[in-house]
Image (cartoon, rainbow, N blue to C red):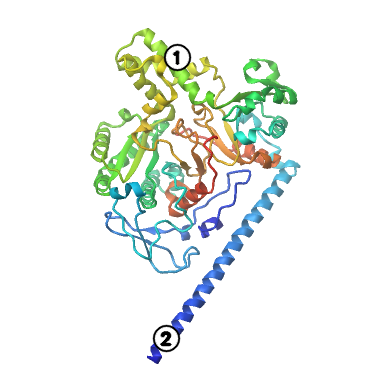
Amino acid sequence: MISSLSPQLLIKPNTATTLSPIPHVQNQRFKLASHVCPSELLSIRKRPGSACAATTQHRRYLLFPAEEEEEEEREVKFTSDAPALAEGLQREPMPRHVAVIMDGNRRWAHLRGLPVRSGYEAGVKSLKTLVELCCKWGIRVLTVFAFSSDNWFRPEVEVEFLMSLLETGVKEETESFIRERIRISVIGDTSKLPKCLEELVINVVETTKNNTRFQLIVAVSYSGQYDLVQACQRIAMKVKDGLIEPNDVSESLIEQELETNCTEFPYPDLLIRTSGELRISNFMLWQLAYTELFFSQSLWPDFGEAEFLEALKSFQQRCRHYGK
Amino acid sequence: MDFRDTMQKVYSWACQIGNLGLWIIWLLIHFAVDLWYFALHIACAIESYLISSGILKRYKALDIDKLRYLAIVIESEEAYHIPAVIQLLQWLVDIGVKHVCLYDAEGILKKSKESILGKLNNATLFEEAGESNLLLDHKHITLEFASFPDGKEAVAKAANLLFMKYVKLGGSGKIQEEKIFTEAHMSEALRAVGCKGPEPDLLFVYGPVRCHLGFPAWRIRYTEIVHMGRLKSMRYGSLLKAIYKFTMVRQNYGS
């Protein structure tokens, strides 16, 4: 709680355990207005009395400015009184690729005496907020673990609801993705999805494939082991076709065939898992070797700007050697 | 004009007083947060002492059998501190942990294998342990040593084994690929190339960064990962607490 009162303060170095809670503090959350189109300004209000604000005035935040070599690809504006990043967040190092395991929807609903579907619906709102924040702060790729291959074993009613939620979400947001120039990619065994959803997914991936502003990768029916196995299957087909020799198979070849090769930055810099669980649950096993792991105590529907800031600041304070 | 000047002066003073007030509040908040973290640090140290000395009784009733396999990832620079590694292993033996995989990316611990085994009583290599009754002794421990080549390189080698089998079968069509390249076959191929260790239940990371540094990815699907801080700052109480917390976790494996 204290650490979220003042984002500008440094988070202390790790103690012997990572299990320090980062509880959601409702009265410290920022409200984010819906982003309508790139040329409009995002409006963020901070609640009066917030310890983070030097003033109770409304502030206008803008889209994070592009890196020099990519400026021509983004539309950006500045106003004289608006910082590009949130307070306490440094420009460097910023993760280019953030992965999130969106855990805790059912527990969130259970704690409130609501049906499970309410938890998932609330989770969708958190995802929208996170996408907006990533766009604003210059994070290029966001991968979210929406549905794992293990989740097929959940009650049928729940699985059907999740599939319909995915379908509704894709349908409702496709125009927004096109307008915001967000590229959508889907990884996982999509052959197991309902036919209509599978077609919808193919359509949205195809429609948005040339968008370059931001990439949202949704892992559906995904497992890290499956990712590796399907990479080997693809390589096997190339071996069969005589394109490569069996002895030429190497780590780099396997990496090229992983499903996360759909992005310029296939290796997440930061993985966030919500709800306090301390595992990666068969998510991007190969890709996470040097990814910073951040385990948040917040349940996914409660994960908002303050919690994301916490994760990013924690990332910025760590020393990354990539094993060297 | 005079009125306007006066109002401007009043406004300016008000702004300065306001800014000063906010600055003081800011300093107070900084101080409060520093005090909080200092208190937290002291509390952790006291808690660790209480756990180590056995005063906190709940840590005595540790169901260590829930921890079937423990992995310890040590950042390579810290892996040179072999005495600290041996101390850590000794604590784990005292707690009753039976199987440990020691990993560092550069293989420093592998190179110090003999030294580590020599300093510990009743420690054997995981590969040699087999089905010996020694494993049932409370104070016996098996050690597996792993490094970066046991991760991605091993998967590539295992994939090569499967590719050779695929080529020999002369398969055609997607069905053949799907029959040969399965998760079960990959696990089997990994064992064939020497990666026989099971999936750890719990993985401790010692070092400045919170990542598993390339620990064999195939094996950590459902592994609980806990960052323990620097090896030189390790405490018995913190170790016991982390293991205790693991034994209280209930996994639903996605279902």
Amino acid type at circle 2 is Met
Q: Position of residue B129 (x, y in %)?
A: 65, 17
Q: Which residue is mark 2?
A: B7
- Residue furthest bottom as drawn: B2
Amino acid type at circle 1 is Leu
Q: Position of residue A304 (x, y in %)?
A: 43, 52
State which quarter of the image contains the C terminus of chain A. top right
Q: Secondary structure at mark 1?
A: helix
Please state the chain letter of the residue tagged with numbered disc 1 in the rendered image: B
Q: Position of residue A74 (x, y in %)?
A: 30, 50
> Is B133 placed left or right of B245 in the picture?
right
Q: Which residue is mark 1?
A: B161
At x 36%, y 37%, the residue is: A264
Residue A228 sits in quarter: top left
Cα separation, mark 1 vs mark 2, equals 85 Å
- Front residue (pair B118, B69): B118
Please tell me whether residue A293 is drawn above or below residue B13 in the rendered image: above
| Number of residues whose C-alpha sits closer than 10 Å to that of mark 1, classed few (under 14), some (14–19) or many (20 or more) | some
The answer to whether residue B208 of the structure is visible from this angle is yes
